[in-house]
Image: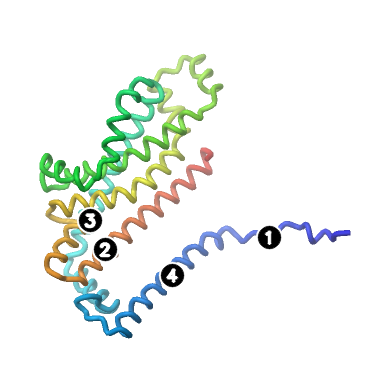
Amino acid sequence: MTSASTHAPRARPDGPLRSVRPLAVGTVSLVAGVVLWWLVTVLFDVPPYKLPTPGAVVGHGWTLAQDGVLGVHIAQTLAEVVQGVLIGSSIGVVLAIAFVRMPWAERVLMPLIVIAQVTPKISIAPLIVLWLGLGIGSKIALVALVSFYPVLINMITRLRSIPTSVDDLARLLKIGPVARAIKIDLPFSLPAIAVGLRLGILQAVTAAVIGEFIGAQAGLGYLEKQAQDNDDIRLVIISLGLLCLLAWAMYALVGLVERKLTARFGA
């Protein structure tokens, strides 16, 4: 006869441990990558103009940070991404509600939206820069263009899964379209909106960099382009690292919000 201990469920690790473990694994991987980078430069005697050591990159970055150079460009790219994502997600929410409540609008507009999304953004960026100039407006527009689509698609899918009993109750209570959107559609769709934002954030950083490559006066993409033109590989690596860190931080922040919303409003 099998003992009771054989069928006893395994003890799950505590919540804090589950949350710390991925961070610990990621930190170890990052440290291992830096050590490998250092070993390659030392063992193979790679010239500094091709691949500088991690210490040289960190030292150069620290000097630039003390001079205030990096802060200006980080703030510029962050402003472009945050404003563009907010505008794009707002457009995605409005269009999702309109498409679900008015199917004819989806049939008319969705082909145009799909064409805009499948077109390479590197080919759209020059046109937007020509229209809106080299300032922050053109970058915000490009970010909004790429970030609204994930929110739109995820929210449409979520809205179409609303139980029919909720629709019947809304009609019975004669809830108007605006009141329904605020009281029913938005709360029900918050987890889906968060998922769309999480996907859009990564595309948004890429779009901001593309816009800064095409034409800009500040930003991490602009800084990286200037470093490339000046053959400053240390600054190229610094700019790339800061872009990765910026994207990861926003992705993790939206992921935290997504988990909270999913726990509150359901998956």
- Residue receiving disc 1: 11
- Residue receiving disc 4: 29
Density class for disc 2 (Cα within 10 Å; few <14, some 14-19, many ≥20) is some
In the rendered structure, the answer to whether residue 57 lies left or right of residue 11 reads left
The Cα atoms of the two marked residues, 4 and 3, are separated by: 28 Å
Residue 152: give x, y in percent of width and height: 37, 35
The mark nearer the N terminus, 3 or 1, is 1
Residue at point 84%, 61% (across, down): 3
Residue at the far right in the pictured view: 1
In the rendered structure, the answer to whether residue 22 lies left or right of residue 207 reads right
The mark nearer the N terminus, 4 or 1, is 1
**Which amino acid, mark 2?**
Leu
The Cα atoms of the two marked residues, 4 and 1, are separated by: 27 Å
The mark nearer the N terminus, 3 or 2, is 3
Q: Which numbered mark, 4 or 1, is in the foreground of this view? A: 4
The Cα atoms of the two marked residues, 1 and 2, are separated by: 42 Å
Residue 237: give x, y in percent of width and height: 25, 68
Residue 21 has which mark? Answer: none
**Which amino acid, mark 3?**
Ala
Residue 215: give x, y in percent of width and height: 13, 51
Q: Secondary structure at mark 4?
A: helix
Q: On the rendered image, what quadrant is the N terminus found in?
A: bottom right
- Residue receiving disc 2: 240
Q: Secondary structure at mark 2?
A: helix
- Residue receiving disc 3: 75
Q: Are marks 4 and 3 in contact (CB under 8 Å)?
A: no
In the rendered structure, the answer to whether residue 232 lies left or right of residue 253 reads left
The mark nearer the N terminus, 4 or 3, is 4
Q: Secondary structure at mark 3?
A: helix
Residue 141: give x, y in percent of width and height: 21, 41
The Cα atoms of the two marked residues, 4 and 2, are separated by: 18 Å
